[in-house]
Image (cartoon, helix red, strand yellow):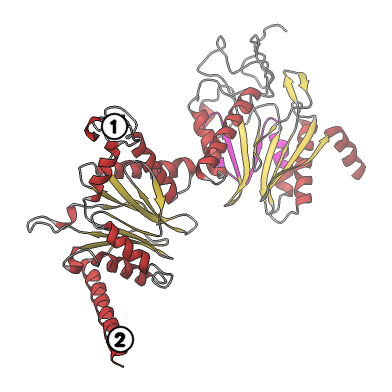
Amino acid sequence: MATRYDRAITVFSPDGHLFQVEYAQEAVKKGSTAVGIRGKDIVVLGVEKKSVAKLQEERTVRKICALDEHVCMYIFFNLFMFVQPFDISRVECQSHRLTVEDPVTVEYITRYIATLKQRYTQSNGRRPFGISALIVGFDDDGTPRLYQTDPSGTYHAWKANAIGRSAKTVREFLEKNYTDEAIAGDNETIKLAIKALLEVVQSGGKNIELAVIRRNQPLKILEAKEIETLVAEIEKEKEEEAEKKKQKKST
Amino acid sequence: MALASVLNSDCANFSFDNCQPLGFGCGPGQSGLGFDATPGDGLSFSVKNHQSSEDDDVERKIEFLHGTTTLAFKFQHGVIVAVDSRATAGSYIASQTVKKVIEINPYLLGTMAGGAADCSFWERLLARQCRIYELRNKERISVAAASKLLANMVYQYKGMGLSMGTMVCGWDKRGPGLYYVDSEGNRVCGDLFAVGSGSMYAYGVIDSGLRQDLTVEEACELGRRAIYQATYRDAYSGGQVNLYHVHSDGWTRVSQEDVLMLHQQYKGQA
């Protein structure tokens, strides 16, 4: 039955679904996991990196990009529509600076991208962007923000969120572990992001890519070495935790 | 009134088109249009300082025209806006009670110099845009953005005869804001502006009395005095002095005083 109503984006099904949009959301669920966490003075985006072929240069496929000095976006996509939203958003960030003489707020640029996506769900001859985006950054007044958009054009603010293949597992982990202590400092927030990803990513630190924005500082992508160090610290902490538990049990 | 055109001189320029509205000040020379088609002119006449002053453009970047005196200046407690209220049609005083301050919204003011219709139309359009911005972004628009919107709107009509020289004044999260915007496309941020045929006289008074540490009353009196002095010497300014004060909670209408009363008052003081 679904097949009769899913040929065109502009057709509702009898029970109120827009199947094309839902299929786009399914497409999004198939990709690599990404996690975004909003700390107090830092926002962190962590992405599961697919292992690259031996001869391929690592850095050519970039899914995390800076939109402006204080905002960056991770686009989760499975198909080949990624360059346009980045570019359009970057242009909009600069146009906003020109007309309003202020940098964009994270909410503004998210709303802009979401409106763009929504337009593609309501016109003829186009299909929705098969894209979910995590947008992080700081507003002018220093508030950290994390937003997520989905192919239907809606957007929500989150304290911490995950999208992609094992999003559900990661989100459950975050719901348990996102506490005020966990985000008390920059390092802790980064470690929380790594821990969340380690739940679902095989083979540890090598397959994690991390980007952080600190207040009033530009986007920084962490080097592989730094990630390794942090992963090692996390492993150590885990061991110490396990030791303590053992000791408690035995005494 | 018969059609008469007096070209290229420092006196009033008559150009009578049927059904043209009254204004207090007319725009800069319609250099591209010629006198047959002068949509910008009307029953609105002014002292034209430099009509075909293409060569002078390098020196005088901001052209002050328009038979009026409006001024605004920033001080420690916000912005003072003072205007006169006379509209002239040549040497005929058409009205002594014109409102030359447009209340764009409770925290933004715009002054009028130039064509009355142009100023009030575009500033009302600006009010609409500001409101839409506020609803979409859930915060007030900044003075910089509001003046930019206005400047961009009129720039599209550059050369088509619009006549507008306005100051956008307000208070936003950066503090007091004051911008001069005109139909030539100028948009300048500053601490003090006076626009109109009486602006030179007003500048003289303000420049000698302006300090950053003025109290609100002193600043109001300074603005009032400056407009009064301008109306005293400039034939195209007069009527009443309308005074507004913009502060962190928005603008307040401070006073409206007839210049004749002010004249008596100052004479009595001296």
Does the magenta portion include B194? yes
Q: Residue A130 at what x, y percent from top left?
A: 26, 42
In the rendering, which numbered label is found on residue B91?
none
Of residues A180 and B171, the one nearer the viewer is: A180
Q: Position of residue B266 (x, y in %)?
A: 87, 41
Along the horizontal axis of the image, is B141 left or right of B226?
left
Image: B103 above or below A51: above
Q: Residues within 10 Å of mark 1 (few under 14, many from 20)?
A: many
Tell me if label 2 and label 1 are in contact, CB under 8 Å: no
Q: Is residue A118 above or below residue B24?
A: below
Image-based side of A78 in relation to B55, left or right: left
Residues in magenta, as a range: B178-204
Q: Is residue B137 visible?
A: yes
The picture places residue B126, in percent across and down from the top left corner, at 57, 33
Which residue of the protein is positioned furthest toward the bottom in this rendering? A251
Towards the viewer: B70 or A85: A85
Residue type at mark 1: give it: Ile
Residue A212 percent coordinates (x, y)? 33, 62
Q: Chain of mark 2?
A: A
Task: Give the residue at x 75% y 54%.
Answer: B215
Query: Quadrant where the C terminus of chain B lies?
Result: top right
Q: Does the image show residue B59? A: no
Q: Residue furthest left?
A: A55
Q: Is residue A86 magenta?
A: no
Q: Quick one: B182 or B269, which is closer to the camera?
A: B182
Q: Give me the C-alpha separation between circle 2 and circle 1.
A: 57 Å
Do badges 2 and 1 share one subunit?
yes
Q: Which mark is residue A244?
A: 2
Name the residue carrying label 1.
A9
